[in-house]
Image (spheres, rainbow, N blue to C red):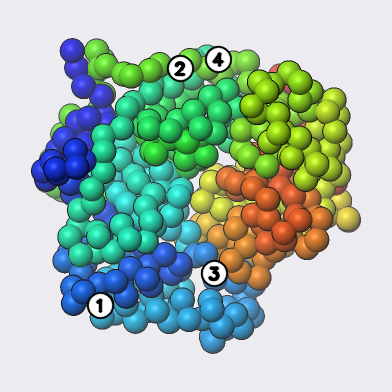
Amino acid sequence: MGKNLFHKVFDKHTVGKLSSGQYQLFIGLHLIHEVTSPQAFSMLRQRGLKVKYPQRTFATVDHIIPTEGAERKRPLRDALAEEMLVAIEQNTKEAGITFFDEGTGNQGVVHIIGPEMGLTQPGQTIACGDSHTSTHGAFGSLAFGIGTSQVAEILATQTMSMSKLKVRRINVTGKLRPGVYAKDVILAIINKLGVNGGVGYAYEYAGPVISAMSMEERMTLCNMSIEGGARIGYVNPDETTYAYLKGRRFAPAGAAWDKALAYWRSIASDADAEYDDVFTLDGSALEPFVTWGITPGQSLPVTWSIPAVETFPSDERPLLKEALEYMSLEEGQPIAGVPIDVVFIGSCTNGRLSDLEEVARLVKGRKVNPKVKALIVPGSQDVQRQAEAKGLKEIFLAAGFQWREPGCSMCLAMNPDKLQGRQICASTSNRNFKGRQGSASGRTLLMSPAMAAAAAIEGKVADARAVFAMAGV
C-alpha cells in the first residue's frame, strides 16, 4: 500500500520521537510578521538564545500596516502599531533575518509574498504565527499556523513538536460552472463537513476540479482549511505547480531545479495511498456561496433562503439562534437582497492578481452603488504593481472603488480599516466572527470576489451570475 503526501513529507522532516509521543519536526521555511513575533524574540532574549538558522526565516509587515498612503508615514499614528513595526525592524536586523518592508518593494500579506517570490515550494514543512498558513499547502507543502511560543521554539531550534495528523482526501468531481470559484468550493466543503469536521486532520484536496485550478485558486482553497477545523490543507504538486514556480526569485535554478523537480514529484501521494477518510463533493452542482451567520460554516448557495433552526440537530440550535440575532436576519429570508454597506476585496484569501483581474473584468464600465463604500486592497506590492501595469487601478477608480496600498486591511482590522457600528460587509476574507472587522457589532458576509463585486454594484447580496450575465445561470 502506498503513502500519501502528508506521511511522506512528515517522515522526511522528523528529527526524532519525544517521550510524550509527539514528533520533533524540522521546519524548512519559517515566516514571521509584526504581530506574533515580538514576544517570541523576547522569549529568546530571556533565555539567552539566538536565532539558529536566520536564513530560513523571512519577515514582512501586514496586519497593522495602514492601506492609505498618508497613513503609512512613520511614525504610525497608532502607537501600538508603531511599536510592533519598530520591534520587527530591530529584531530582524539583530538576528540577520530578511525583512520585506515597504522599502524593499516586496511588502505584503505574508501568505501572498511567500508564494509569489518562490519561497514556498513542494515538499517543505512551513510554519508561521498566523492561522491561515495553510495557504502554502497549495504547493504540496505541510504548512502549519502556530502560536507565539512555537514561533520562539522554531527561532531557537528550527524544529517544533507535534503529533501526526489523520488525513482526509476530499475529491471534488465534475467541472465548476461559470460564476463558481475556488472560494465557493471551500465554503461548500466547510458547510458540508462543519467548522469542527477537520479537527485532527490534514485535508488533501484532489479530483478534476482541483486539478483544473490555477495555483492562486488552490491557495484560496487551502487558505480556509483551518476554518473547517483542519490543521493543514494541501494539493499534490503537478505541472501547474512547477510552471508557477519556475523562474521565481527563490525557486531553484539550473541543475538545482532538476534535482528539486525530482524530489517534488517523489513526494506526491501514491495512486494506492491510504487515507483515514474520503469525502466527495460534486463540483458541477455548486452555486456561488454566501455566509449568513457568525462562522464560515453558516453558509448557503446565493439562491437559497436561510434555513429554519429546527432543521438542525438540537445541539447546534443555540449557535444558530445567536447568529440570526447578531446578524439581524430571519429564518426563511432569502440571502439575496440583504443590503450591504461596505465591500472589501482583498486578504490572504482573495487579494491576488487573478482575483483583481476577475473583478476588473466584471465591473468595467459599471458603477458602485452610491450607498456602498468599496475597497480593493492588493495583497502585496508586487500584486499592486502588476495590477496597475495592466490598467486595473483605472477601471476600479472609474467604477467607484477605493484603490489601497497592500496589507491585511479589513480582514481583521488591526489597522485603520474598520467597520463602523452595525455596518454589514460583503467580504472576500476568511472569517465572519463577531466583531472580526473592527466593530463590536459589525457584520460580515463571506463570498467570492465576483460575488463581492456584484454586491458593490447592486448595494445588496446578488447572484454574480445574473448581475454580470454569465453563461449557465
The Cα atoms of the two marked residues, 2 and 1, are separated by: 46 Å
Residue 423 visible to the viewer: yes
Q: Which of marks 2 and 3 is nearer the N terminus?
A: 3
Disc 1 marks a residue whose amino acid type is: Arg
Residue drawn at the location 51% of the way across and 32% of the way down: 196
Residue at 29% in and 79% down: 93
Q: Which of marks 1 and 3 is nearer the N terminus?
A: 1
Q: Residue, x 82% and y 48% (percent of image)? A: 340
The reply to whether residue 237 is in sight is no
Q: In this view, does 364 lie to the left or right of 412?
A: right
* Disc 4 residue type (three-letter): Asp
User: Residue 282 bears which disc, if any?
Assistant: 4
In depth, the one of 355 and 333 nearer the eye is: 333
Tag 2 and tag 4, C-beta contact below 8 Å: no
Cα–Cα gap, marks 3 and 4: 39 Å
Specify the quadrant that holds the C terminus. Answer: top right
- List the residue tagged with mark 1: 45
